[in-house]
Image (cartoon, rainbow, N blue to C red):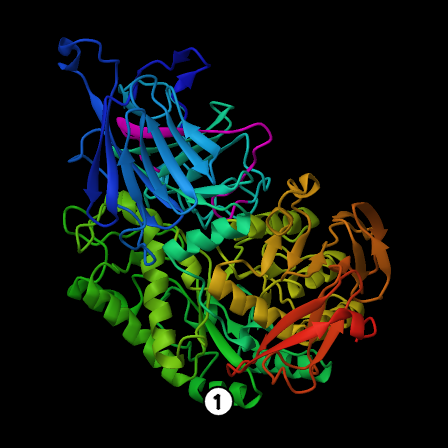
């Protein structure tokens, strides 16, 4: 949201009050964090006693919830509107130390220090290992009032006619943090535009807009700077970011109401920022080895029954195409009944027997759900009578006809409603369902009442967290931690604890394939470790070239699913070469499972994503900072998907001797390469000196990785490498490999 008119003026109808000085600073105690500083920051300089009268002031509190993290709370009226913060499972008391000197107040936490200077002008500086990384200076911390006719840019991030758009307010608190020369900003959730966010206006407001729009399914008010720090705005409501867009020297973030709270999170590397961020907000959970295999779907609006499903699975087996999971999309339930959690008897008359037959084929089963109850569902009357649905202020059930006729919304703030919903899922798990695709969760209305009195604006983004938690708890209860997995579309801060997430509704084009990757890399920079997408695109039917290129990309992602809307995504529907491409890259992924599964284990320990943007993997290399058409798969494999019909691809290799994984060709990095690849290839280069754990099987993802394990040593390294392998049943072995004592490639 933009409040100013250029550098000198503010927009019509806007009244802006800025912190002008640190009038006084004293040591205090934060109720959760312990040691803290509290600063009175009047909105004018106090030069005489009379200046304190009729004068608004901001209260700024500094504390630390975790070593290397500093909490900043800016308050106009403490009793005013605040949407509350996110769950912080990693917060600890006593991480910070506070002191006040004649010159300034200092709050230190690990390598990070916040320093606020006495007097005018307002100056709050953040130092990492003694070096300034960002600061809040003159006209940075502000309280904004809007008149009814105020002329401001308000990114609604939704359709105002549906009641889903972020509402306008008459009061905002904002902060602006300095952007240094060459400083770049990443993150803010799964966003499909440029990976570098500089110059963008970003609204943190979940919406179902597809991958070809500025809207996002997964909005995360966290950004990461290449200067060695990150920032989380601790507000699940509507947060508006201007990233070097309104004030080109600053990142501005604003929230409606009277209170703004944010955390500055230390690095110095991007991976260390994400490690601290996920330590605070929750680590990604471990996911089972079987989930890394190929997921095959019915697609959305196609016609299917058990015969169709069995035909697909048997044909995949006949063509030696390993499948690990079969997914039933919406029409496993009867139309107009979503959700009633009942198999449509017209096409699945024997669901118990069918699931048993699928398990006998060594498959896991996933089914689609959403958090809505359509009016024709037999569950609607039951839920309405019990008070399990979100209501309007007049007490009536909130309903509309978008998506499903008479659709209502389960109220997960009601413990009884949550337990009721979970009971329906437990019956499916007992029947043989192994995973749930938790679709939707973004179309959450305003102007409604929740059981626990939650603010509807707070709940718009946070609803998905409660929804996914309800489902995930059932799977953990039934399968145990480490064997539970979702396939989720919507998320916000904390959602990374319940993987996997997929990229939403793309179109079946090379352009959409590229924007899908940008979204995944942006999500990775936001603390999400596991990610997938619809191979071939969702809307429309891809031509064979798009399908084959997307298949290679999809099987070189952490998780891989064939899925579409109006057409099947079985490879022989495109051409025989598509079958060969699927076989090649599926088998390659199975061989890589010891390596990929360990990357997933490491992600659960540190938060480092399995698919890593180049800027995350190679900090300090200026050539990688804008790259969003390639990535590292785990620590050692560089992937550059092909986004052209011709097979031409241009990509960057960092310095060193890189080896193509498929051909063994060795090339020198430190520059750009343009290559032409057939459908059976892709730029797939192994990092200099890497030692890859290479599995003995290519027919399934969940095997004993230690049985027949090979350690492949690649040129370009020296000394001893340590390689850890974790098996699906939890055994861990670490190998010390002397690179000089083995033949290259062993």
Task: Give the mark count.
Answer: 1
In the rendered view, would you say 665 is above or below 378?
above
Residue 129 rendering spot, x and y as whole percentages:
47, 40
Does residue 164 appear in this view? no
167 is within the stretch colored magenta:
yes
Q: Residue at x 70, y 83 (%)?
A: 696
Q: Residue at x 73, y 80 (%)?
A: 319
Q: Residues within 10 Å of mark 1 (few under 14, many from 20)?
A: some
Residue lying furthest front: 102
Residue 449 rendering spot, x and y as whole percentages:
19, 49
Q: Residue at x 58, y 78 (%)?
A: 324
Quarter of the rendering occupied by the C terminus:
bottom right
Give the magenta-colored segment's residue range.
Answer: 166-191
Q: Which residue is mark 1?
A: 356
Out of 74 and 324, give the one closest to the viewer.
Answer: 74
Out of 287 and 116, give the one closest to the viewer.
Answer: 116
Residue 160 rendering spot, x and y as whole percentages:
37, 36
Residue 202 left/right relative to 675: left
Q: Quadrant of residue 145?
A: top left
In the rendered view, would you say 167 is above or below 576?
above
């Amino acid at each position: 949201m933009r409040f100013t008119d250029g550098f000198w003026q503010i927009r019509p109808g806007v009244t802006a009050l800025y912190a002008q000085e640190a009038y006084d600073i004293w040591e205090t105690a934060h109720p959760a964090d312990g040691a803290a500083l509290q600063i009175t920051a009047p909105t004018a300089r106090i030069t005489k006693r009379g200046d304190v009268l009729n004068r608004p002031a901001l209260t700024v509190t500094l504390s630390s919830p975790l070593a290397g993290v500093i909490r900043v709370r800016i308050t106009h009226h403490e009793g005013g509107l605040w949407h509350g913060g996110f769950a912080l499972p990693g917060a600890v008391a006593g991480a910070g130390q506070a002191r006040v000197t004649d010159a300034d107040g200092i709050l230190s936490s690990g390598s990070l220090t916040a320093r606020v200077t006495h007097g005018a002008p307002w100056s709050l500086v953040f130092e990492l290992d003694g070096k300034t990384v960002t600061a809040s200076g003159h006209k940075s911390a502000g309280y904004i009032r809007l008149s009814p006719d105020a002329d401001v840019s308000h990114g609604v991030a939704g359709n105002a006619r549906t009641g889903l758009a972020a509402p306008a307010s008459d009061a905002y608190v904002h902060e602006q943090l300095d952007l240094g020369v060459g400083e770049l900003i990443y993150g803010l959730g799964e966003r499909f535009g440029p990976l570098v966010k500089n110059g963008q206006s970003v609204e943190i407001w979940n919406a179902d807009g597809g991958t070809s729009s500025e809207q996002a399914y997964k909005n995360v008010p966290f950004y990461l700077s290449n200067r060695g720090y990150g920032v989380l705005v601790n507000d699940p409501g509507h947060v508006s970011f201007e990233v070097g867009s309104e004030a080109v020297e600053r990142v501005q973030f604003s929230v409606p109401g009277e209170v703004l709270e944010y955390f500055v999170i230390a690095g110095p590397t991007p991976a260390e920022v994400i490690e601290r961020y996920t330590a605070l907000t929750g680590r990604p959970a471990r996911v089972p080895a079987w989930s890394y295999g190929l997921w095959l779907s019915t697609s959305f609006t196609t016609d299917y029954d058990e015969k169709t499903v069995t035909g697909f699975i048997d044909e995949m087996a006949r063509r030696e195409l390993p499948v690990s999971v079969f997914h039933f999309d919406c029409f496993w339930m009867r139309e107009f009944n979503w959700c009633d959690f009942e198999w449509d008897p017209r096409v699945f008359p024997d669901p118990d027997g069918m699931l048993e037959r699928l398990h006998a084929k060594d498959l896991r089963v996933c089914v689609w759900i959403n958090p809505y109850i359509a009016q024709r569902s037999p569950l609607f009357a039951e839920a309405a009578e019990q008070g399990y649905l979100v209501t309007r202020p007049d007490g009536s059930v909130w309903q509309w006809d978008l998506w499903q006729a008479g659709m209502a919304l389960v109220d997960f703030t009601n413990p009884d409603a949550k337990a009721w919903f979970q009971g329906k899922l437990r019956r499916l798990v007992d029947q043989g369902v192994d995973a749930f695709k938790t679709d939707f969760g973004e179309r959450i209305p305003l102007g409604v009442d929740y059981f626990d009195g939650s603010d509807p604006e707070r709940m718009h983004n946070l609803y998905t967290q409660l929804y996914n938690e309800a489902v995930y708890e059932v799977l953990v209860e039934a399968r145990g931690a480490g064997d539970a997995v979702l396939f989720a579309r919507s998320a916000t801060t904390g959602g990374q604890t319940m993987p996997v997430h997929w990229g939403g509704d793309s179109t079946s084009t090379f352009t959409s394939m590229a924007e899908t990757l940008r979204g995944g890399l942006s999500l990775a920079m936001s603390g999400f470790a596991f990610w997938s997408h619809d191979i071939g695109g969702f809307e429309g039917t891809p031509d064979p070239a798009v399908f084959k290129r997307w298949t290679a990309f999809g099987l070189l992602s952490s998780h891989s699913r064939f899925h579409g809307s109006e057409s099947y995504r079985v490879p022989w529907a495109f051409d025989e070469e598509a079958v060969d491409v699927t076989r090649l890259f599926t088998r390659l992924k199975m061989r890589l499972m010891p390596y990929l599964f360990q990357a997933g284990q490491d992600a659960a320990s540190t938060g480092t994503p399995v698919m890593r943007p180049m800027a995350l993997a190679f900090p300090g290399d200026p050539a990688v900072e804008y790259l969003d058409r390639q990535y590292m798969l785990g620590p050692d494999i560089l992937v550059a998907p092909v986004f052209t019909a011709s097979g031409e691809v241009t990509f960057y290799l960092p310095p060193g001797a890189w080896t193509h994984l498929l051909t063994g060709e060795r090339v020198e990095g430190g520059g750009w390469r343009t290559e032409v690849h057939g459908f059976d290839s892709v730029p797939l280069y192994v990092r200099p000196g890497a030692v890859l754990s290479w599995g003995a099987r290519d027919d399934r993802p969940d095997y004993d990785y230690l049985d027949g394990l090979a350690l492949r040593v690649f040129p370009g390294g020296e000394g001893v490498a340590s390689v850890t392998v974790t098996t699906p049943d939890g055994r861990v072995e670490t190998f010390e490999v002397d690179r000089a004592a083995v033949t290259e490639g062993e």
